[in-house]
Amino acid sequence: MRTVTIRLAGGMDVVVPEPSWCEGVHQQGQALENLFHEGPETGLIVATLRGPVEILAAALAQYPFRTDVLRRSPVATVLLDGAWYELGSAEVRELAAGLVAHAEVLRGMAEELDGFSGGGR
């Protein structure tokens, strides 16, 4: 595992292990408990009449030195309704299943729209 050196708020340097998925961008000069690792962000680009829009941005993240020891494990961070939420593996699977079900609803809407206009744009 590779390591990274972070300068903490008091000026002290600390060397911490860095997960392979971390992009290696870390804010310097913060408290150790605020240090976090973040993986590459991914989202769904939706074409609209006003141009492309990204929805459901998501990335892996970890705060390995949080004061709450139970929340130190990696999580998925997902942008929902303008705020970032931390989800565990079960919650990510539930989100994915909900998206699959919602995709079927959207396909049904597309078919209904085809009936109104004789086809898509």
Image (cartoon, rainbow, N blue to C red):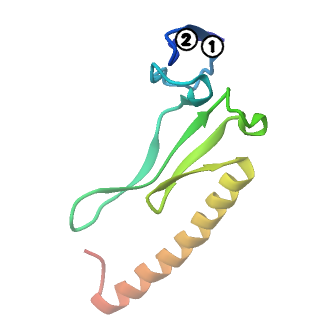
Q: How far across and how far down the image is residue 98, in percent?
A: 62, 66
Q: Residue furthest bottom?
A: 116
120 to 52, vertically: above or below: below
Q: How far across and how far down the image is residue 94, in percent?
A: 69, 60
- Compare marks 1 and 2 and give the one earlier in the sequence: 2
Q: How far across and how far down the image is residue 2, in percent?
A: 61, 10
Q: Nearer the viewer, residue 73 or 44?
A: 73
Q: Nearer the viewer, residue 108 or 17?
A: 17
What amino acid type should be assigned to the residue bearing mark 2? Val
54 to 15, vertically: above or below: below
Quarter occupied by the N terminus? top right
What amino acid type should be assigned to the residue bearing mark 1? Val
Mark 2: give few (<14), some (14-19) or many (20+) Cα within 10 Å.
few
Q: Secondary structure at mark 2?
A: strand
State the CA–CA distance, disc 1 to disc 2.
6 Å
Whether residues under marks 1 and 2 lie with C-beta atoms below 8 angstroms apart, the answer is yes
* Residue ID at (48%, 75%): 107
Disc ID at residue 4: 2
Q: Quadrant of residue 45?
A: bottom left
Tell me if 69 is positioned left or right of 104 in this view.
Answer: right
Q: Secondary structure at mark 1?
A: strand
Tell me if 73 is positioned left or right of 5 in this view.
Answer: right
Q: Nearer the viewer, residue 71 or 10?
A: 10
Tell me if 22 is positioned left or right of 118 in this view.
Answer: right
Q: How far across and how far down the image is residue 110, in percent?
A: 41, 79
Residue topped by disc 1: 16
Quarter occupied by the C terminus? bottom left
* Residue ID at (74%, 52%): 90
